Amino acid sequence: MNIICDKSKLLEGINISLKAIPGKSTMAILECMVIEAKDGMIKLISNDLEIGIETIIEGDIKEPGSVAVNAKVFFEIIRKLPYNEVSISVNENLTMNISCGKAKFNIPVKDTEEFPYLPKIVKDKSVLISQFTLKEVIRQTVFSISDNENTKVMTGELFEIRGSQLKVVSLDGHRISIRKVDLKQNYDDVSVIIPGKTLIEISKILNGGLDDEICMYFTDKHVLFEFDNTIVLSRLIEGEYYKIDKMLSSDYETKITVNKKDLFDSIDRTTLMIRESEKKPVIIDVKDTSMSLAINSGIGSMSEDIDISKEGKDILIGFNPKFLMDALKVIDEEEITMYMINPKAPCFIRNMEETYVYLILPVNFN
Amino acid sequence: MNIICDKSKLLEGINISLKAIPGKSTMAILECMVIEAKDGMIKLISNDLEIGIETIIEGDIKEPGSVAVNAKVFFEIIRKLPYNEVSISVNENLTMNISCGKAKFNIPVKDTEEFPYLPKIVKDKSVLISQFTLKEVIRQTVFSISDNENTKVMTGELFEIRGSQLKVVSLDGHRISIRKVDLKQNYDDVSVIIPGKTLIEISKILNGGLDDEICMYFTDKHVLFEFDNTIVLSRLIEGEYYKIDKMLSSDYETKITVNKKDLFDSIDRTTLMIRESEKKPVIIDVKDTSMSLAINSGIGSMSEDIDISKEGKDILIGFNPKFLMDALKVIDEEEITMYMINPKAPCFIRNMEETYVYLILPVNFN
């Protein structure tokens, strides 16, 4: 193999490819990315067996071939090269020579025999969505997946398509996050659970342009994301997702509307009173036109009043402050509305159109 | 005690005061800062028994008094207050009330009986220096102090004043850093060892203005830094400093002049070939008008040629790349000159005027 390419283009490709390189693996080949130069195309390929990525980079192929190189070593070297033009060649002893200006590196590489190439996927059911929208719905829901591998289904997000609507759901046993977005056309029904890790990596790679689109293909076992010069293939999580519709309710006894930033900042201040070992709730006392937040801990106590507008009953209710803050952080509206029934029933933060619904379970206190 | 002050001014003062708060201490009182409101002045005082700091902040004293408050908790609360005007009061039960807009915090505080106030220092021998200059000489030398507490003297820096010249020296057994700066007037002789930790904290506090001055007072056991609204008092390290003059030499067999950035970047690239567990030297081969850097390790090999101008013999010599980079990083000149005798003798990087001298021991290789 012998190729010449631009340091900057190569780095862009490596940065994408690194997202499917495991931190540490018992299989050394997984810590490698494959550089494949054939049919006039240079591809970087990586695969941690959960997520696989192929990305095409620009460059001149002087001699085709393919080789597996330790991804992190390769990245560090390319990153620190002095000039833009890089020449990369591999000899018959599996030594890669990287040359740039007067700097020359020699590193051992592997052949690609053992490398787990991405399986071929039948591109059948496809859905088109803007990169911006996909990136946004991931950000607005992914914080409430669970990291408990014993409840595998909770480590992923439900992607459900009905007609022209995509609904994305995550939950961790204490809260549920739901976002709905409109697609540009109607599609066949889809209902899959995509691993949270895949979504996090995808949203790091996406440039997030409003006009840039991404195409998702679904099969029984896989989801394939296709965009720009890159494809990302991920396994789906098997199993059935929770029936969340039963957990949702539009009944309420108390409805309050409050400035989001005021509420967020005030809850943030209550968290100053929480030591990591303590699980202290913030207690919200809704009375007439004001809500008072209070917290009491080994460090001290804190209280603050916030103006609200209210319909319905007064209520005294406790929350894990982190759960409230996580939801508030991803809502873009200046004002939010909270719906509560009683101190033991879920609280809902949602807008009129229900394009977002955040359910948060209260906690006991006394 | 009852005071009213500006959040921003208070935060500035706390940030300075925190530099003498230990990360973790067996004495809870050391994790506190004292707020002292008396004689129309509000002072923050902290002392980790190595370094003590007093800083004056603006504010209104409604009722004088003094109290010790956990520094980190106090800092976090003040930092997150919603508005600028802060009211701080302490009641007879040693509860501090911090109030700002509608946010109210109550935290327990201590009385100041156990607090180790700073000893009074006789302000006798004083030296005036610009904050910029002091900050610079610290940065340019402090990287080569040792962190080995068994050779206590090496954990500090020699500050030596002769006439109108200040010489600052640090060494760690592998290298020596020397910087000389001119003072604006003549002073009596001073020769003290200031703890590296003190210098690091001082340089974090100094704003570094060219026209802002700092006054240093020396006693047998202490150095006192006085500037702006702050004093920093530090113990000195006892004992005698190394006789470094015997280690310096102006003889050389090889003198090379090289572009600093080219050399730095190239050494930086060689370090890509070093695993943390390996201690691989970079080998420098000086021949005629070029030097070639090479390194060989378990990761691979790297080589690069750099243009130089040379006087004297060719030489093949090995270095710990970090030691070379540390010195190059703090030299501002575009070109540097290296003086070498043989592969076993120290290498010197110095300018003509010897306002800086960096001695680096080579390492064996074969």
Image (cartoon, coloured by chain):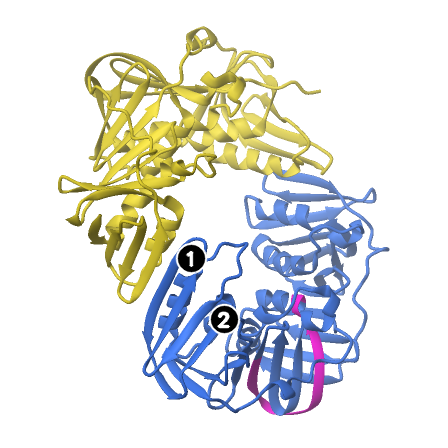
Chain colours: A yellow, B blue
Depth check: B270 or A243 in front? B270
**Residue at 65% across, 84% down:** B244
Closer-to-camera residue (B282/B307): B282
* Mark 1 surroundings within 10 Å by alpha-carbon count, few (fewer than 14), some (14 through 19), many (20 or more): many
For the question of whether residue A359 can be seen, the reply is no
Q: Is residue A335 visible?
A: yes
Residue of label 1: B272
Q: Is residue A196 left or right of residue B42?
A: left
User: Quadrant of the rendered structure where residue A286 is?
Assistant: top right
Regarding mark 1 in the picture, which secondary structure is present there?
Answer: helix
Q: Is disc 2 in contact with disc 1, using a CB cutoff of under 8 Å?
A: no
Q: Residue at x 78, y 55 (%)?
A: B66
Q: Are the residues under badges 2 and 1 in a single subunit?
A: yes
Residue A208 figure quarter: top left
Q: Crowdedness of circle 2 by 10 Å Cα count: few (<14), some, many (20+)?
A: many
Amino acid bearing label 1? Leu
The location of residue A230, given as percent across then percent down, is 24, 35
Left or right: residue B262 versus residue A39 is: right
Up-down relation of residue A139 to residue A348 (above or below): below
- Alpha-carbon span between mark 2 and mark 1: 15 Å
Which of A164 and A349 lies nearest the eye of the viewer?
Answer: A164
Q: Which residues are magenta?
A: B178-197
Q: Chain of mark 2?
A: B
The numbered dot on residue B319 is 2
Quadrant of the rendering where the C terminus of chain A is positioned:
top right
- The reply to whether the magenta stretch includes residue A102 is no
Instruction: Identify the mark nearer the N-term, 2 or 1.
Output: 1
Magenta-highlighted stretch: main secondary structure? strand
Pinpoint the chain carrying mark 1. Answer: B
